[in-house]
Amino acid sequence: MTDFKHGSVKISNDIIDQLIAETALQVENVEYVTGYKNKKLEKNKKEGIVAVISDNNIEIALTIHVKENKNIYETSENVQKALKEQINTMLGLNVKGVNVICK
């Protein structure tokens, strides 16, 4: 939650997870994000997106599926870079780490 002169702003975890998924999907060669389907988060997911926020910091873990015959390492690195930039820009949070699991 961020405090402002006239109140505060609280962003739900689902919105943060959706931002993470949409950002990852914009990266070339990401086929899909586990736990996110048809622009919606799947409830009761055992894996997919986990975001832990503490103070002004966030740590992210997500499972992606890379398109067949594409460079997994390069795609994962691009997802990490995109998420760090987007989360910092949109939410003002310091990204401590982005752990990408590829399937």
Image: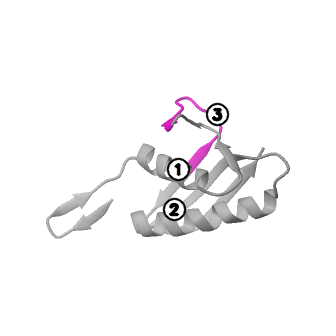
Looking at the image, is mark 1 or mark 3 nearer the viewer?
1
Quarter that holds the C terminus: top right
Q: Name the residue under label 1.
A: 22
Q: Which amino acid lies under the numbered mark 2 shown in the image of this protein?
A: Ile
Q: Mark 3 points at which residue?
A: 46
Of labels 1 and 3, earlier in sequence is 1
Looking at the image, is mark 2 or mark 1 nearer the viewer?
1
Real-space Cα distance between discs 2 and 1?
Answer: 17 Å
Q: Does the magenta stretch include residue 16?
A: no
Residue 58, x across and y down, in percent? 51, 62
Return the residue found at the far left: 6
Real-space Cα distance between discs 3 and 2?
Answer: 20 Å
Q: Name the residue under label 2.
A: 58
Q: Nearer the viewer, residue 81 or 100?
A: 81
Q: Which amino acid lies under the numbered mark 3 shown in the image of this protein?
A: Lys
**Does dot 3 land on a helix, a strand or a loop?**
loop
Q: Which of 84 and 46 is in front in this view?
A: 84
Highlighted range, magenta: 39-50
Residue under the point 47% across and 69% down: 88
Residue under the point 57% across and 60% down: 59
**Does dot 1 land on a helix, a strand or a loop?**
helix
In the displayed structure image, the side of residue 64 where residue 85 appears, left or right: left
Residue under the point 85% across and 50% down: 69
